[in-house]
Amino acid sequence: MALTQVKRYLDNNISKIIFISVFALIFSSCNEKDSKIVHYEFEGIRVSRYDTDKKTYLYYGHCNNPIILTEKASAVVDWRFDDYIFTFLLFHKDGRVEIITAGGGKIEKLLPKSKFFEKDYETGEYFKLMENYRSIKGYRELFQMSDNLKLEKKRNEEFKSTVKVGYELEDDKMACP
């Protein structure tokens, strides 16, 4: 009796089962976080970014090869503990790029001779810095990174950041200068 009911259920719902299975397969194969390399540029200063395993690899310059980018990254932000990245890049006129972590992620690696640097801000200094960029200049040379690229784009449009952003699919056949 129970076997007959299962057979009848499957016969009546086979198209739904196929649709859900196909949708689940398509959805699970689309992992936007690990499929793109992000390029940031402000007044000629370029930074390439690649995320994998809840780590963000930052390369000073243009690089579209995830293998080279991860091996030769100038800075690495680890966000495995926090489970999200909430970090800013502040582009300075002298070509240096300041990494400001705001609770989501911590800097795991920072090459001493790179153009990246980190400055520890006291809470009051941090909020004053953010407020100055928000109210006086807007977020012109400041860019907020997120593990959610759609949210990242939306937030930086709202903040009127003038940092240019480009996305491309990873390609391990391309090289970095």
Image (cartoon, rainbow, N blue to C red):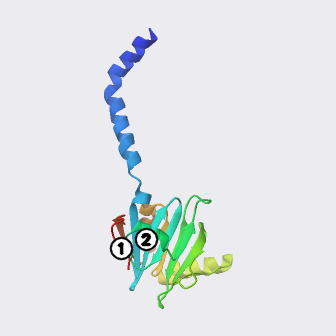
Q: Residue under circle 1? A: 175
Q: Residue at x 36, y 21 (%)?
A: 10
Q: Residues within 10 Å of mark 2 (few under 14, many from 20)?
A: some
Q: Nearer the viewer, residue 22 or 43?
A: 22
Helix, strand or loop under label 1: loop
Amino acid, disc 2: Ile
Point 50% across, 86% down: residue: 96
Q: Position of residue 19 (x, y in %)?
A: 33, 35
Determine whether label 1 and label 2 are within 8 Å by CB: yes
Checking the image for residue 68, the label placed there is 2
Residue located at (48% from left, 68% from top): 70
Secondary structure under badge 2? helix
Picture coordinates of residue 138, whole percent (x, y): 47, 80
Q: Residue furthest bottom?
A: 94
Residue 30 shows in the view: yes
* Residue 155 shows in this picture: no
- 37 vs 126, left or right, is left
- Give the mark nearest the N terminus, 1 or 2: 2
Q: Is residue 119 left or right of residue 148?
A: right
In percent of width and height, residue 62 lies at: 39, 77
Q: How many marks do you count on the picture?
A: 2
Specify the amino acid type for callout 1.
Ala
